[in-house]
Amino acid sequence: MTVSVLDFVPIWTLLLGLAVFFYVLLDGFDLGVGILYRFAPDRRSRDLIMNSIAPIWDGNETWLVFGGLGLLGAFPLAFAIIIPAVYFPILIMLLALIFRGVAFEFRYRDAEHMTFWDHAFAWGSLVATFAQGIVLGAFIQGFHVQGRAFVGSSFDCFTPFSLFTGIGLVFGYGLLGAGWLIIKTEGDLQNLAREQGRWCFAGVLISIAVVSIWTPILDPGIAHRWFSWPDIAFLSPVPVITAILAWLEWRALRSSSETGPFACAVGLFVLSFIGIAISLWPMIVPHHFTLWQAASPDRTQAFLLVGTLFLLPVILMYSGWSYWVFRGKVRADIGYH
Amino acid sequence: MSLDPVLLSRVQFVWVIAWHILLPAFTVGSASYIAVLEALHFGTSRTVYLRLSMFWTKIFAVCFGMGVVSGIVMPFQFGTNWSRYADATSGVLAPLFAYEGLTAFFLEAAFLGVLLFGRRLVPAWAHLVAAVMVAAGTLFSSFWILAANSWMQTPAGYAVVDGRFVSVDWWQVIFNPSFPYRLAHTVVGFYITTAFIVLGVGATMVRGRRFIDEARTMMSMALSLLIVLVPLQIFIGDQHGLNTLEHQPAKLAAIEAHWETGSRVPLILFALPDQAKADNDFVLEVPLIGSLILTHHVDGVVRGLKEFPRDQWPPVAIPFFAFRIMVGLGLLMLAVVVVGWILRLTGRLFAATWYLRVCVWVAPVGFLAVLAGWTTTEVGRQPWTVYGLLRTADSVSPSLTGADVLLSLLGYMVVYLIMFPTGYVMMRRLVRRGFVEIDIDEPPVASGRPVRPVEALPGSHGGSGA
């Protein structure tokens, strides 16, 4: 295959963006539920919170694997540069995900170590989220690259900016988690989730604001993209809609709306995601390689695309079915004893 | 001694994959076993199959959870520690890994929830479908991951452009020369591993005179499967060996510790291979049999390691001994199964206490054989990641220092040494409890919400969830 009529890069950009977004949304809310888990007042609440995500967390985390492998398949150069550059955040994330993942099973089986695995679940969720936030911050800042490889130190990724995005993501996932718990629980537990949602929302607002100011200061290219005329006019809907969503989220958290807080949190994530995409486009390794330069050969992208376009709708269908099976309020006190 | 990032990265990969492979070794087999039990219950309505399915599903759930989290670690190893390998091979291998995710992981994850928590929420047939889908997922996963692994052993259907591999024929990439043999050998090995666990657990219960119905069914089902699969596995293994002789002669020479090329070569039963002087000490061998087994002809020519440049030799002792351990365990398994059938046909199977004890002792034998076989094939591939084309030393991430990798290796060691023993203790406790808490008439969970992720264990935490 020498000349290709079709350019697969935009399709893969879209698909990969979708995969990453699904991951952030889905594992985001169950990691968020894990972050809030420590504040549950008693054993019964902890059971409820755990039950609200136990049947679905595994599928949610699968998007991480698909996102990683999709990056490897479609933009291997980006994978080969970015992943070693964030060696330790990835390590920390993986180890934290291990603790949190096995806690679902171990917590119930291991009666003597109940408290240990409860803590493992909560800390695992928090640390994994923080590490993912560091990866995001480091990615936006960019890496030392020579040729086709990352040549900096494995500790370069720990900067004030990346630590801040780490904290910001903890609030973000916390907000998603609170939104999920508002949907799945009732009464006191739901009220608690609303209150937690408000705290997380405050953290999210501050994080979005600080990152929006800090990023253009760090990177003149990004500043130029957002603030030069006429771009500023075209891009102004992004901050405006974000502000509207923030206002709606605040109202939803203070009202009796059950789906509003989650829906608006998803909206805020969409807008933040679009914001980052606008800042970095068309680079996949900031300052070094565009999506096209990092792309795998046409044959690889085409071979993977055929199956993906067929399988993704099927996956979405049966994953949706499994969500449907476990729909409604989660209850811990029915059918036992 | 300075810290070598290549060596440490290899140790780290061995550490994370050796632990991880134990889980699919059991979950691939047990997922199929659960699907069979569910189908038998669906077809016959005999409750013993339902109780067995519920019992093994609990153990499966613990294993599967550990398999998921230790499996997520694996693809990231390619990026963190082996980025040059990832850059060079992704054009060929990445779609295979990605298809594993698309066809297997999503399938398993989505239907696992229904299998574990949904028995009362969906119709019986839908629950059966969920069990079958989870089993299918584990097999799809084996298909893709072994296709990728086999391509690294016997690359085909590729071209090299700018130092990177690109595919020219996907069919040849996937169905590369060693793939059918490796797939059959591995999956049959996983089934055998599971069957020996089921046999051992059944034997424990028969010995303890508990849950006799279930225990006898377990032992009978396991022995029935094993009498077919163990001889089949020995045949497949032999065919796999012929394939290795053809495509990876240096690896085969290392496995057999053959330094010189020759015909009518002996079968070396034991030796201490000495890599430096390219010879063996303390040799115990049987004349002619080596050629007969390896080539199926007494006069067959077997190439020795000295035909290959020294810098392309694998470390001989490791595949040599690992292979002998694997074959020895295979013969042990065959003996256990044959004796079991003799006892069974003479009606003494459940009364022969000594045999029941043997079954308990050999329960983990499949895991050891899987590890030994995997060590043989992977160490035998050295010094290459892609056989004959990409060296392991040229595969590692250039930015890593030895200290970086030492730190991450220690992290994986600590965490795995917490997770795996805990999981083992938990599964052993489930086996000890047996069928005490398996209550097929438990009240339906109203309005579709699981009581607990898996049925609570009364007594372990005092019904505090109620």
Image (cartoon, coloured by chain):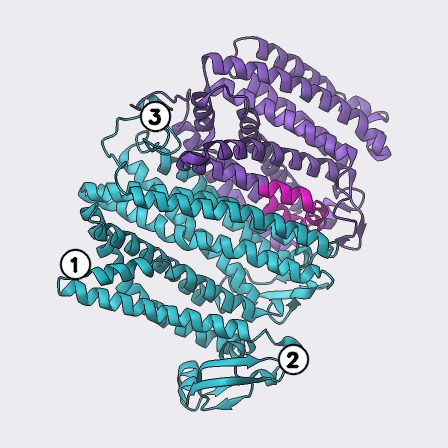
Q: Is residue B151 above or below residue B139?
A: below
- The picture places residue B401, in percent across and down from the top left corner, at 74, 55
Looking at the rendered structure, the kind of residue marked 1 is: Ala
B302 and A174: which is toward the camera: A174
Rendered image quadrant of residue A94: top right
Q: Quadrant of the C terminus of chain B?
A: top left
- Magenta stretch, residue numbers: A68-95
Distance of label 3 from label 1 (alpha carbons): 39 Å
Residue B173, image x, y percentages: 54, 63
Query: Which residue type carries mark 2?
Result: Arg
Q: Disc 3 marks which residue?
A: B463
Q: CA distance from mark 1 to mark 2?
A: 57 Å
**Marked residue chain, label 2:** B
Task: Determine the CA span between mark 2 and mark 3.
Answer: 66 Å
Considering only order in the chain, which callout, 3 or 2, is on the residue closer to the N terminus? 2
Above-or-below relation of B81 to A41: below
- Which chain is rendered cyan in the image? B
Amino acid tagged 3? Gly
Residue closer to the observer: B112 or A157: A157
Q: Tell me if residue A322 is in the magenta stretch.
A: no
Q: Circle 1 is placed at which residue position?
A: B351
- Name the residue at the left extreme: B347
Q: Are marks 1 and 2 in contact (CB under 8 Å)?
A: no
Q: Quadrant of residue A208?
A: top right
Q: Which mark is residue B27?
A: none
Q: Which chain is purple?
A: A
| Residue identified by numbered label 2 | B310
Q: Earlier in the sequence, mark 1 or mark 2?
A: 2
